[in-house]
Image: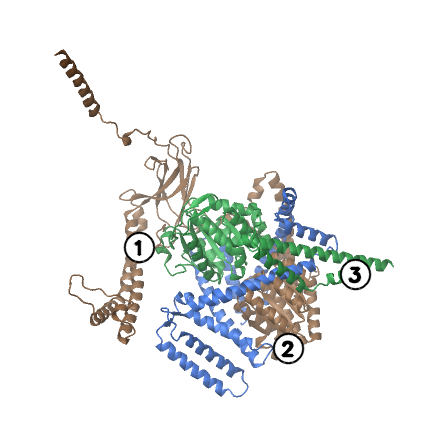
Amino acid sequence: MKRQVPLVLVFLFGLFMIFQYFVPHESSEWVYEFLLDWIYIIGIFALALGIWSLYVVSVDKIKTRKHDWKYSYITLAGLFGMILFGFTARHGDEWGWFLVFVACVLLTIGMIVQAMAAKTAKGLPLALAGVFLIASILIAAFDDTWSFYFYTAEGLQSTMFRAFFDYVMMPILATIFSLLAFFIASAAYRAFRARNLLASLLLIAALIVMMRFFPYFGSTVGELIARTSNWLMNVPNLAAQRAIVIGVGLGIVATALKVILGIERGYMGKG
Amino acid sequence: MKNFFDRLMRLDRRWIFLFLIVVCVITYAADFEVPILVEREVEVIHDFVDSLPPGDIVMIAIDYDPNNLAELHPMTFAIIEQCWRKNLKVLITSLSQNGPGMADQALRDITDSLAVTKTYNGKVYEGREIVNGIDYTFLGYKPYFALVILGMGQDFRLPFPTDYYGSPLDSIPMMQGVLNYNDVACVIDLSGGNITDYWISYGQNRFNFPLALGLTGVMTAQYYPYLGSGQVFGIMGGLLGAAQYEDLTDNPGLAKDGMRVQLFAHIVIILFILVGNIGYFMERRKLHRAEGR
Amino acid sequence: MRFLLRTTVILALLLGAGVAAQTEPPPPVDSVETPSIPPPAPVTGLEVFDTDDDHGHSITLTWELSADDGIGQGSVMSYDVFRWYPPLMDSLAARRDKIQRAQAAHARFRRDLGVAEDALGDLLSGDREFSALRFSVATPTDDSTFVLDRSFVERALRDTIQVMSTNLPLLPDSIRALQEVFESALERLPEAHKTYPTGGTWKSVGKAASGEGRFVNSGSKDPMSGDFIPDFTDLYYRVDAVTADEAVRAESVIVGPRQSKGQWFNGGRFPVFWAVIIFGFLTIYFVSRARKGAELYVRPLAGIEAVDDAIGRATEMGRPILYVLGLGTAADVATIASFTVLGRVAKRVAEYQTELIVPTYDPIVMSVAQEVVKSSYLDAGRPDDYKENTVFFVTNLQFAYVAAVNGIMLRELPATNVYMGKFFAESLLLAETGALAGSIQIAGTDEIAQIPFFIVACDYTLIGEELYAASAYLGREPILLGSLKAQDWAKAAVIVLAIVGLVAASFEWTTFTELFHVTN
């Protein structure tokens, strides 16, 4: 039963989606739109599972004192901090007790983590967690300079949320991406060696394509390099990519059919 | 000399990183311009947008994260500025979850820059106020982009009953009579991930609208087959594509600034490749000589 | 005397000439005659039909261009498409507006009530002065002696809140009543259209440029939308050929009644339908052959064969194995293929009692991967060795995920890194960091742009469909091998068709190429 039900569901829904592709009628569209809404709902629940998983793993790292365990506190602070900032917004320009509230909530969570991670002497962290929790509830109840916004998008415009997003997250993400430039340089240095004929062709092609937009070659040489590079991109590169795309496309159809028909069951855990 | 080529073959990657950083910093700090050679696949996009009559709607999908900001933000700026200078309306969506905040900020910056009278390609454009709801509508973000792309093909209101700021789409002047992709002149997808695949397969294949792409440099080669088959009518690839578009619109920005860094970074990489190959050949010659003895 | 007479005559003549000149004022500038545009020739051959292969609510019009299209002084600049609207459509539009306004008013009411209640709270608690509240009350305009004070504001706020609180619950009922009237009017729409041509009006539904002989009047299926076109309703159309002067135009004959409806099969996708059927039959054929014991050859895949060796290496070195499922969702076929490989790796890892680390990007993928790994441990007979934290969620931000995985690599120093699934720009970041950590690396992805990076930085790479073949290769089950064979034969068919198509296109044999044309 535990195995049959998922297989039947996959078969029915897979078959319907194939059917829906060929049937433009409104009734098939209606069912399709209904299913789309369900996918959103399932996705949200799955996100909750994911957050719980991250929390448990971080607590485990702290508990077992794994390498660099202290950074797990920062991970949790970042996670819960951004959730708080996203669900709250100030009414005006005054901060009031908002930052104290955030600190109290994070300390509450920190103390709970500490209690979960401690092998003995859980009493003190739990007591402190209780104190910070009461403090944050009192601040939330009586401070009028800010509010919770669970249903509307005010939180996304909140100063703290935008500040952390614009001035912390965006630069960090751009920095990690910029590492790619250096890794490409070191990978290219290692990989582009003329070991044999094919490797030499690869090297020459790479050099031509990299040099195609050099403006300092002069018109004749520049034109020749640009045309050769265009030919390389639009003929052999395109041919090879089309071949891989066709192969991948057929592979996708085959795998999808196998999943729908229950032949491929790796995703269920029993390969 | 022999040890030198040995060391060259086993060069620690940190030397490469250091050399690259130094070159990038110097070229960024120095103020000079690099001539840009424009590719046909970028020019086609510019000409298409240029040929649209005032009042037409261009849909721009800002489907990238802050990671890809350096390459794709200049494209966003250049295209949206061009549209607004030509009095085209812009319908923006952002199917990447970190895109909306970035897109919102970009819109604010671009509206500020259009308030000033400027000259582009010899033509003077008077500064004007860009109004939300009249000159642009920002739909915002919804998860599961494949479903959103499909939904928009029937009605924009299906995935986006309201815009990013909470106004019902039916109450927005620009969206009156605008139902789905049939009512926009083209879709330009600016993306750094696999959302592009879905725009092509679920969007363009199903609903047949003109689609152009703005991609990171790494991804560009992968989408040339679609250019060849006509599913996509233009591609802007990476910082170079953005610089080319800025050049065409006579609107120099971050991309053109970045091109001088990219050019010299490429030169450094090519030099290291050549040096590595020289080291490799010298090593091989040494081995052959040792075998010959 | 003669002088006087002559002078008088001359003066009279001059005067007369002047008067004559003045009685005929110069013609005003705007009465200068302009050449009038003659009415153009109307369009002919107007055909109106239900748009094919759609969900309904759409009518297509085609016509022969006007004889004056784009030529001469009276040239046609555009075509204006008109549809006949019965009076009920105007009444529906008015009702629709009413409903939308009522809904907007309801939302505004709710919001304003909240603001009024907050303002009263601020006033009573003393947080704000009566003159600085976020809700402004109406004051009498005809009393010059009126002075605004706290008690007036408080009273006005209480009265306003009471009125709003009383009326707010009634609004949904009034909206519902309006909607019922609207829906009953909708039901009468087909009957109303049958009253043509009595009482209705012709309205423009769109324009086509000169030179275009086709227009699709595509509407919304949502009755609340202003673009709603009802299905199974008699519709009447005409097309006007319009010159540069909008008033100068020629009407076509009226065509109708025509009805729009949704189709049950999209005929434009027949090539895809047949391809799926043929591929399905190929799969069934080869699977049945495999079940009957036929030997099906699959070429060796170095990357898959290296997995066992890599797991052995990790066990000997006492270091963990890092398995990265990629950045795809559970709906991506590459991720599904990766689950199969993960199951195999997890089973071996359970047998050798090596540590396995599986950081995931997507929460749903995490749930599925947990189930896969748990089942593998169970299959290996070591259910107690399974740890909940083996598979964990990191983040679903691309580069934050990469940073986390790189950190794991540099801290845990895994002996083997396996990358199977969908990867994007972060592929080289992962692979290079893995190389720095001294791990043996096996990668497989269907993302074409990332394959070169994996080839350069990893020891073994599965390219494109080799990843999908991994499940068949690992398990060696006849059913899976059979489907792999079907895939290969389909590829061979595509190659043959591509060559034939190349020849056909060169000789312009459009019949063959049209067979594969997919519309809409």
> Is the residue under label 2 in contact with that under label 1 (CB below 8 Å)?
no
Chain of residue at mark 1 = C
Q: Which chain is blue?
A: A
**Label 2: how many residues lie within 10 Å, few (<14), some (14-19) or many (20+)?**
few
The mark found on residue B2 in the picture is 3
**Mark closest to the chain's N terminus, 1 or 2:** 1
Instruction: Please state if C149 lies on the left or on the right of B140 as rendered.
Output: left
**Label 3: how many residues lie within 10 Å, few (<14), some (14-19) or many (20+)?**
few
The mark found on residue C96 in the picture is 1
Q: At label 1, which amino acid type do we have?
A: Arg
Give the number of the mark in front: 3 or 1: 3
Q: Is residue C117 above or below residue C283?
A: below
Report x, y in % for residue A159. 42, 67
Chain of residue at mark 3 = B
Q: Residue furthest left?
A: C1
Colour chain C is painted in? brown
- At horizontal 41% and vertical 53% (from top left) the residue drawn is B136
- How far separated are the C-alphas under marks 3 and 1? 87 Å
Q: Nearer the viewer, residue A165 or C226?
A: A165
Instruction: Please state if C494 lies on the left or on the right of C221 as rendered.
Output: right
**Marks 3/1 same chain:** no
Q: At label 2, which amino acid type do we have?
A: Gly
Colour chain B is painted in? green
**Label 1: how many residues lie within 10 Å, few (<14), some (14-19) or many (20+)?**
some
The mark found on residue C381 in the picture is 2
